[in-house]
Image (tube, helix red, strand yellow):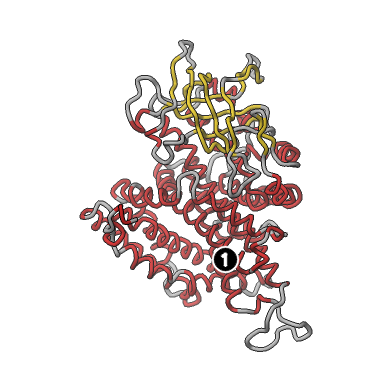
Amino acid sequence: MTTYAAPLRDMRFVLHEMCKAGDTLGTLPGFEDVGADVMDAVLEECAKLCEDVLFPLNQTGDREGCKFEGGKVTTPKGFREAYRQYVEGGWCGLTAKPEFGGQGLPEALDYLVAEMVASANVSFGLYPGLTQGTILALTALGTDEQKTRYLPKLISGEWQGTMCLTESHAGSDLGLLRTKALPNGDGSYAITGTKIFISAGEHDMTDNHVHLVLARLPDAPEGSRGISMFLVPKFLLNDDGTPGARNALACGSIEHKMGMKASVTCVMNFDSAKGWLVGEAHKGLAGMFIMMNKERMFVGCQGISQAELAYQSAAAYAKDRIQGRAADGPARPDKAADPIIVHPDVRAKLLFSRSVTEALRALGVWAHLQVDVSHKHPDAAVRQHADDMVGLMTPILKAAGTDYGSEISNVCLQVLGGHGYIAEHGIEQIVRDVRITQIYEGTNGIQALDLVGRKLGIGNGRLFTGWVKDVEAELAGLQGRNDLREFVAPVEEALGRLKAATQWLTEAAAKDANARGAAATDYLRLFALTALGWMWVRMAQVALAKQGSGDPYYDTKLNVGRFYMTRVLPQVAALDATLRAGSQSTMAMAEAAF
């Protein structure tokens, strides 16, 4: 069996001690009363729900999966009851606007809630997680009527929200989609087409589904500039807002997947289904990205959540499993062998997993504080800078969070050896479940291309330059701190490499059209490692100040950080070399030779 206890101590450390979230949130309208006591109470209640209700359903949900019969989807045993508890607790509307029934709490807090839910049961967490994006898109772009009729039920969790983008011939290139929207003459549209890979497209846990569907109007220009977004409910609403007649849409089938088996993935057929335009005509792709960017950061959190779950399970196993003797003499002479945690290779695997996971969590909370600042700060310049940081970090959090989530899950499976490979211990499920996170909401290759091909160029490099200035200013303020030198110096070196690599990439791209594509993945990893190192500098400052307090947590934090600095961050040198190799060896071979 896997092991999970919500990492509340580390979450509180990141939120209150490293990020000082209360200080930041206290300057933002609407968050003046969201202090540490409020945030801790929310985290503690969420931990109980996750440990006691959601986590026990994780392996059973995987074994049972979702069932499809007669156009209806049945979720695994216990899911409906657990979802009812989730809804009754108000978890679906944590950050939503109070005027529509939400609690109006910060995104930074919601990020940690999402991590716990996903660690406990990543399949379950996808259902309310998808609804969050729908809420965000309708809040930003919906008409007053759409908001009034749909947002309260989405925010309460009584209704499910979905994104209907992908078609069998149009995945990442949405400009190829063929779904049509024909005016009905009464302000509504008839939506016709088939969408695939629709998470939560049909199930038995909610009374209605609210699909946001990308489609083309008759006069739409070609490509992505001709896409519009439509709200298409499963049940049309009566005058009093209750679900009425069934709309002309249905689930045609469900996918049989490698992992996340308790999260249904549907083929959805729209046959002149009635829908309503959301936002401006032909501006649907921009509207969908309001939702997509939220979901990309959410998916990065899913990767981190599975790394945490895998680490906890592997660490517990390593302290219990006896095999061989410690190289420097028996650690447990009273036993036939020592626990495998005495072996350097096992320790290195666990420390790699923990050092990366804790830094990713810190980066995630910091980035979501920037989301809160970008939404609410009274100074427009401060809002813009925070929004820049969110834009820059979104592809990094999504790709690094999920790449490392998958890598760490595999590393932790290796700690269990053969027992990790069989279903009984649950690690193989984590490996299967986390794998999709590197693919959906834009593959990690797409994230890397977004970073090097778009984000680096915005405002003549404003995003990257702004982040570098912030980091350099922090590091400069730590000069002369000999106790921090082992953390600051490696990050300074990594940042220097990142700046030089960014300049090299700009120059190489001017000469070679394939330069960015060839370097993108290595560049993103180099950037991520540097950003995570920056988080460790911040965490080390707090831990050093608290040494001698009697709490061993701070000594442990420093030891984990030292491992990152000496055994993980040096990978930037190899990444720098590989990205500078250019595209020649990648593109030289003829297509027929593959």
Residue at the outermost top position? 185
Front-most of residues 347 and 420: 420
Label total for image: 1
Q: Nearer the viewer, residue 495 or 385?
A: 495
The answer, for residue 358, to whether it is visible in the render is: no
Q: In this view, does 424 lie to the left or right of 252?
A: right
Relative to the observer, which residue lies in front, 338 or 545?
A: 338
- Residue at 51% from the left image edge and 70% from the top image edge: 564
Q: Residue at x 66, y 30 (%)?
A: 72
Position of residue 83 measured from the top left corner of the image (x, y, whole percent): 71, 39
Q: Name the residue under label 1.
A: 411
> Vertical placement of 13 versus 188: above or below?
below
Q: In which quarter of the image is residue 589?
A: bottom left
Q: Is residue 463 above or below residue 103?
A: below
Image coordinates of residue 184 in percent, x first then y, are 47, 13
Circle 1 packing at 10 Å, graded few (<14), some (14-19), many (20+), is many
Query: Which element carries disc 1, helix, strand or loop?
Result: helix
Q: Where is residue 269 in the image (x, y as percent from the top left)?
A: 53, 27
Q: In this view, does 529 lie to the left or right of 456?
A: right
**Considering the image in quadrants, where does the N terminus appear?**
bottom right
Q: Residue furthest front?
A: 592
Of residues 232 and 417, the one drawn nearer to the viewer in this rendering: 417
Q: In which quarter of the image is residue 347?
A: bottom right
Residue 294, percent from left and from top: 51, 42
The answer to whether residue 197 is above or below residue 41 is above
Tell me: 381 left or right of 24: left
Whether residue 585 is visible: yes
Amino acid under disc 1 = Val
Please, is residue 83 above or below residue 8 in the view?
above
Q: Which residue lies furthest to the right in this view?
A: 334
Q: Which residue lies furthest to the left in this view?
A: 511
